[in-house]
Amino acid sequence: MLQLDNEKQLLKMLYSGQQIPSPNGGFLMLLGVRTTSDGSALAIFECSVSSLRYELTIPKATRTERKKVKDELEAGSEPDCPRHGTGARLERAGKDLVCRACGVAYARA
Ligand SMILES: [Zn+2]
């Protein structure tokens, strides 16, 4: 598995749903995201041209993001992903509330 550079820009594209250009030409297809034990996530991509696979670490929730989600939970509303925005509902996964699109755990369920 190859690592992707220029993480910040790639993450921005990932959160906004833009197509990510591949280092080999073509683009990167998102195969899936996996929540890791510390609450961050790993996104796996496949290059549309070379079929090489790449991984990108998605940083875990910041204190600000956690607080936002916690406040919404306490107010009785269903929180959306702080990064993906409206419509990306957080879902229960084991003991955590996780965004299915980025795999990051934002709160305890
Ligand atoms: Zn998300």
Image: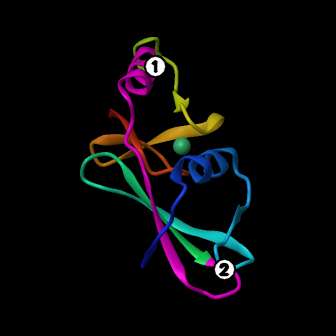
**What span is colored magenta in the figure?**
47-71
Question: Is 78 left, or right, of 24 in this rendering?
Answer: left
The disc, 2 or 1, on the residue closer to the chain's N-terminal end is 2
> Residue 9, relative to residue 86: is it above or below?
below
- Residue kind at label 2, given as amino acid type: Asn
Comparing 31 with 95, the one in front is 31
| Residue 40 part of the magenta segment | no
Q: Residue at x 69, y 81 (%)?
A: 48
Residue beneath label 1, please?
68
Instruction: Identify the residue under disc 2.
Output: 24
Which of 55/107 is in front? 55
Specify the farthest residue to the bottom.
Answer: 50
Query: Which residue of the protein is positioned furthest toward the top in this rendering?
Result: 75
Find out if the beta carbon at label 2 lies less than 8 Å from the nearest ligand 1 atom.
no
Q: How many marks?
A: 2
* Closer to us: 8 or 98: 8
Location of residue 14 in the rendering, given as x and y in whole percent from the top left corner: 62, 52
Of the 4 image quadrants, the one containing the C terminus is top left
Left or right: where 46 falls relative to 91 = right
Q: Nearer the viewer, mark 2 or mark 1?
A: 2
